[in-house]
Image (cartoon, grey):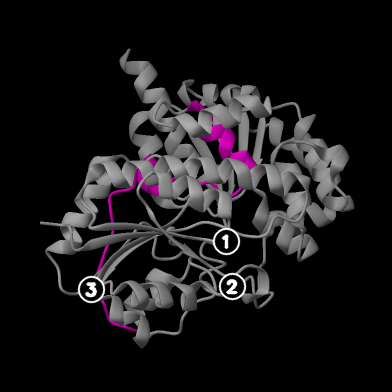
Amino acid sequence: MTNDVAAVVFEGGTPQDEMDIWFSGVRKAITLDTLEKLRRTEAFGTVILVTNSRGLGAAAARLGVTVRESPAGRDFHFGRELLRTVEACGLEKVLYCSGASVPLLDGGEFAAIAARLAASNRLMFANNVQSADLVAFTPAAALREIELPDIDNPLGWHLKEEAGLPDAYPAPSAGFSFDVDTPGDLLFLSLHPAAGSRFRAEFAAAGLTADKLRTAAGWLSEPGSELFLAGRVGPAIVAHFNQNFPCRFRVLSEERGMKALGRQARGEIRSLLGDYLREVPPVTFFARLAEYCSAAFIDTRVVFTAVRGEVTQWDRFNSDLGRYELIKDDFVRAFTAAAVHAPLPVVLGGHTAVAGGLWVLADVLLAERAE
């Protein structure tokens, strides 16, 4: 039996501007899709949503989810709130994820994690130990043995290194690798047939298009094509494409784990691509890139942080969607405009653009090949 396992989902925040308010609404739709899957599996004794959004909480309660109100803004601390939830609800075996972190995991995969927890007395299971979005662990009291992180990304690392929990990881897949952190991630999700119905309704209402992403993805199946990947690129996705597709990659992998390892917080981010872009204008970079490659996928967080330090969420999000005319930072605006008008299709985004998003494209392309 797995009904002593609890699923705990965090989703909330304090939207700062019009873009953030809209994106928060889409994330809430994805959260409800995930909560419904968790409830339908019947593998969890309880499903808990921790949120500061009354609207989301009310919608989740109608699905049979237990809702706990969390602090907002500066009063919110992820680790302390997770510990409070665990102790208040008397939890022992916990699957944690953020609301929009694993939108493509199906009920069977959630149930398999629950079964694994139910059969263990000491375990830490994470989708990515360097930057986790899903962490399943037991005993829950291990939270008392670690430095409680203020964000969820390092949770798995702390449980492994400080509490000494034996660690396990799933085989890489779109379900375990893809999460929604930025508006650009929504474009990838819109292409996958397993995307939830509430998300699809929100995406359609926004009038977004994934046309450029589709064009870039088309090159992945072209024999002899070369694609440029830059940012926090992991080896698993490159190996997957090497085994299943005829394209070639030019890869510049930089600053993996920059949040979980504290490098970003300490101002230690360095980037070869960022150094190059200090020497040449973005227009020149993309013109030269088109001489080598058919398409490009760029994790801009590494470049932006290395070149400009702290970049506002407003500028990052508008860059992901190619809306350069709305961007305030001169470098980010110039880089984004050059990418939009580049002589090759360029996909900009956060980590997902060179990680989980590519797993989504692989799923879609393999399914099309099988038809």
Q: Is residue 151 left or right of residue 238?
A: right
Instruction: Residue 295: give x, y in percent of width and height.
Output: 62, 30
Q: Which residue is mark 2?
A: 76
Residue 102 visible? The answer is no
Q: What residue lies at 24% left-to-right and 73% top-to-bottom?
A: 92
Mark closer to the observer (3, 1): 1
Which mark, residue 166?
Answer: 3
Which amino acid, by three-letter code, is at mark 2?
Phe
Where the C terminus falls, by quadrant? Answer: top left
Distance CA(mark 2)–CA(mark 1): 10 Å
Distance CA(mark 3)–CA(mark 1): 33 Å
Instruction: Residue 339: give x, y in percent of width and height.
Output: 75, 36
Q: Is mark 3 in CB contact (under 8 Å) with mark 1?
A: no
Which amino acid, by three-letter code, is at mark 1?
Asn
Q: Is residue 216 magenta?
A: no
Q: Is mark 2 in CB contact (under 8 Å) with mark 3?
A: no
Q: Residue furthest bottom?
A: 145
